[in-house]
Each structure stands twice: as structure tokens, then as C-alpha cells.
Image (cartoon, grey):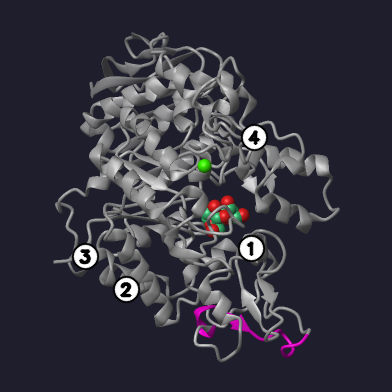
Amino acid sequence: MSRDDRQTPLDAPRPWWKDAVVYQIYPRSFMDSNGDGIGDIPGITARLDHLKDLGVDVVWLSPHFDSPNADNGYDVRDYRKVMARFGTMADFDTMLAGMMARGMRLIIDLVVNHTSDEHAWFVESRKSRDNPYRDYYIWRDGKEGSQGGGPPNNYPAFFGGPAWTQDAATGQYYLHYFAAKQPDLNWENPEVRAEVYDLMRFWLDKGVSGFRMDVIPFIAKQPGLPDLTPAQRRAPQFVYASGPRLHDHLREMRREVLAHYDTLTVGEAFGVPPDAARDLIDSRRGELDLVINFDIVRMDIDGWRKTSWTLPRLKALYSQLDAAVGPYGWNTQFLSNHDNPRSVSHFGDDDPAWVERSAKVLNTLILTQRGTPFLYQGEELGMTNSPFESLDDFDDLEVAGRWRDLAGRVSEAEYLANARAMGRDNARTPMQWTAGPHGGFTTGKPWLAVNPNAAAINAQDQAARPDSVLNHCRALIAWRRGSADLRDGTYEDLDPEHEQVFAYRRGAGLVVVLNFGRETVRYALPGRLTVDGVVFGEAEVEGQVEGQVVTLAGWTSVILAVRTA
Ligand code: ISL
Ligand code: CA
């Protein structure tokens, strides 16, 4: 009986992905095996033992499909072909076999809100108004007639300019929420849906265990595509993500494809507030399993501008997100990915004297919160943002596109400072494997410069040091596996207002205390708790437990065994 046609009672068998630790690979930057400066699939295969040793259960692979790389693979030209620079389908099969031989599963990136403008479907669609593929995409006449009247509505694109581009062949405009090279598919067309279901089966039949679904809430458009208000234009994702047919599409996808396989589906819920996300992941509804939300990673970014965050606000978000999933949902736990700055630079302290300690604190947070942890490549090392010197150093079309939009309204120095803090390229600098040339990522010239601190922060050095970020993650992932309180216990913030300490209870038996600062803190636990001892903490932590008081050195964390007095 497939899952979506029964109420999933609370005592249903526990899905495997609730206990999994997921690791995201951005293939372009993970490992280059042939010296062309671009990461590739044989490079991933060569590094699978790094993932196995870390204790990873699932790999999420960012797009590996044939693409012109306008948006580094998030513009797919052929869903059934491996990007030539990444390797061959045989390489993919070898990588997948290598993962499975190590007990790891693979989920791939399903990018079906849009395709590349070089996809055969769009090449056909744009030829004429009556082309059989015309309705695979969203074409409209301009405002006043089809010549020169301006775009059909005032939708902005995320990578700059309007979300409509007029096409010479027919004079009509096509919709693209992202770049003009990423035309949006028309999900109201049942032929489009059937094509997507077919390509999903193609990869599932190869042994893939599911999908991370790129901006999946965007596939349902607003009926009639009315103009946005000025407030909506400032954050259009909330309108783009709330089309009325979204749940119908997801339930049909579940019925047609997913219900027939044992899968993990993770929707990138850009533009979906926590309460709306609950409906996407409620196991009784047969839609998605998990969502990637933006509440924490974007808590201090307003458009292109970095604002600020505080620990009490961060803690409030954790409690809100934990409560929002309800009894039939489950959370993802992450602090970075390929679209966001490095977590230790964003939420930690990336001063060379503190970076390792604070990276370990943040990884402890990710690995002890309630939900499925997602680590991003390099996060297990405490890799940091990169010192981009000028706008020319960035590869990301989002950085260039937003700069064009700002045209003269903001100084280049101010824009550069914000791009350095929050730009997506921070997470896309190559993985740092060794202290050697280009961090051991490539023997050639890397497509994006390796962070100059690779000699100090790299996997080879850390594998040999017991107190490294890498070995901290390895040990905590292993310990977590044996802890029912961490894997499935309740979550309770013990001190929401404290400005430097993040202390929370997991289940009945554990308390986690994180010091989010350089100063040593003496932290008094609530009187109702009796501490039985330190069960996990860094070797150099002075986690002395005097009765109810825990002393934590700067940027350290500790896990305590407790019971209610
Ligand atoms: O917030 C954003 C828009 O300004 C971006 O970080 C990003 O576009 C958004 O989070 C959606 O991300 C996904 O879709 C994009 C792609 O560029 C991102 O890499 C992908 O994760 C379009 O496919
Ligand atoms: Ca390569």
C-alpha cells in the first residue's frame, strides 16, 4: 500500500531518513580528478572514504546534469545526460556503486521549476506560437499588445531585471524567475508533469534514493499572474511560492512516482514560512518528507544587504521551527549550503585563533538539534568565507545581476562588502584537502580561487589531529547514532534570553550547552536538573560540573547527562 493513501499513524515504521546524516556535495568544487580545474564525478568517487570515515549516511549531490552552466548546473539542458566536464554516465554509475558499497545512499538535485534555455524543449517552444512544445513554458503577450508594450506584469527576477524576456521569433515574453537562460516550465501542462515523472523514474531506477527539489514551491504559479505590490516586489519569493496548485502537483508526483520507491524528498522551500511548510511535510498528506527552510540562514540578509542577528533571535527561530513541524513533520538541521556563506563566518568566529573552536560549536549545534542534520562540504573542516578582493573575483551571476539592478544607487565598496559577507561564492571555493597547491583540489587552475587559508584548514591536517573539527564531527556523528535522546528526543530551550549561551534539553536525559563567544562562561543550569556528568565535549573543554554550574571556555560546547531532580 503506498504511503499517500493511508493515514501515517505516529506509530508507523520510522523512515530511515529520520536517523540519517546528510552531506551536500557541490560537484564543481569537491574534487578535480583530471586537472582541468573543475570538480568531477571520478573525483567524488576518489574521496568516498572521506565521507564514510565522517559517518555520512546520505549524499545530496547538487546538479550533475548536462548544462551550459549559466547558473552552475541549476540550468539543465538534458536531464538524462551527465555534464561532460563532470564525466560520463559510467562514472556516475561507478560513484553510486561506490556509495552503496559503503552503506551510503544518494539523493540528486531535481531542478524542474525551470530548464536551461538550451534544453531541446525550449529550443522548440520558442520557434512559433503553435509549436507542439509552446505550452511547455509560460508565454504571454506584452502589456499592450505583443510589440513593445513591456512585460506582461511587474515580476522581478532573482538574478536581476524583470522575470520576463521578449523573444524575437514571436514577440511574446517568456517567464523566468531566475536568469533569462532559465525559462520556467509550465506545470499546468500535464505533458510537462509527465516528462518530469519520467525523468524521476529514470534516476530512481538507477538506484538513486530520492531528490532535493530545487525551489519546488515555485512550480505552481499565481492564476492570472497579477502584478506584485511594492512590498511583494521586495520579497517576491513569498508570492512565487504560494501558488494554489502546489499541493495538487506534489500529491500527484507522490502518487505517480514516489509512492512506488523508498525515497527521501527534500523540498527547497524558498519563500515558504514555517506554518505553510508544515503542510508540505505532514506525513499524512503524501507530499514531501523534509524542507530546506530559509528562516535561519537568511535571518540577517535583506535582499543583497547583510543586516545583523543576535543569539536570542537565533534561539527563538530554533524553537519556532521545532514547534512548527508538529507531530507529523520533521525538521532539517543545517547552517549553510551552496547558496549561503560559510557557517563559521556567518554564525561563528572565523578569526584564525578561534575558527576551529567555533566551527566545532556550530557542528555540535547542527548535530544535536532535533531533525535530520545536513552538513555542507567543508563545514566538517570549519572552512571559512573567502577574501574576494573585487567584484571581478566572483563567479556567481546573482552577484553580477544584483549589481546591475543597483546601478549607481549604491557604492561599489558597500556592495562588495555585502557580497563578501553573504555571497554564494563563499561556499563554492574548492574543497580544501591538503596544504599543497590549490588545497589539493586540482593539479590545474581551479575554476574559482581556493581560499588562501587552505594551508591552515584542510582535511589531511585535520584527519591526523584528534582535536580537529573533522574528528569532532566524526566522533559526534558516531555518538549521536547511539543516542535516542539526540535522534528523537524532544527539544526545549533552557534559556532563550541569554546573550552568549545556547542551552537546550534533548529528550529526558541530555542537555547541550554551547558558548557562542570568546569569554569563558560559568553557566548555572535550571535548579530542577541534576547533572550526572559530561558525556561529550571537546578535549580542551573545561566543562567542570560543580553541582548545577557548568564552566565553558570560549567557543566550546558540552553535552551533559541529566535527570530531573
Ligand atoms: O536566495 C536566492 C535568490 O536571491 C538564492 O540564494 C537562490 O536563488 C535561492 O535560494 C534558490 O536557490 C535554488 O535555485 C536557484 C539556484 O541558483 C540555487 O543555487 C538553488 O539552490 C535557481 O535554480
Ligand atoms: Ca575535472
Instruction: Name which of mark 4 and mark 2 comes first in the sequence.
Output: 2
Q: Amino acid at mark 1?
A: Ala
Q: Position of residue 28 (x, y in %)?
A: 52, 44
Q: Which residue is mark 1?
A: 179
Task: Compare residues 455 and 278 and report the one nearer the observer.
Answer: 455
Q: Amino acid at mark 2?
A: Glu
Separation of marks 4 and 2 at Cα, in angstroms: 43 Å
Comparing labels 4 and 2, the label whose residue is closer to the camera? 4
Q: Position of residue 178 (x, y in %)?
A: 61, 63
Instruction: Name which of mark 3 and mark 4 comes first in the sequence.
Output: 3
Separation of marks 3 and 4 at Cα, in angstroms: 43 Å
Comparing labels 3 and 2, the label whose residue is closer to the camera? 3
Comparing labels 1 and 4, the label whose residue is closer to the camera? 4
**In terms of image quarters, where does ligand 1 lie?**
bottom right
For residue 296, say whether it is visible. no
CB of residue at label 4: within 8 Å of ligand 2?
no
Instruction: Name which of mark 3 and mark 2 comes first in the sequence.
Output: 2
Q: Which residue is mark 3?
A: 260
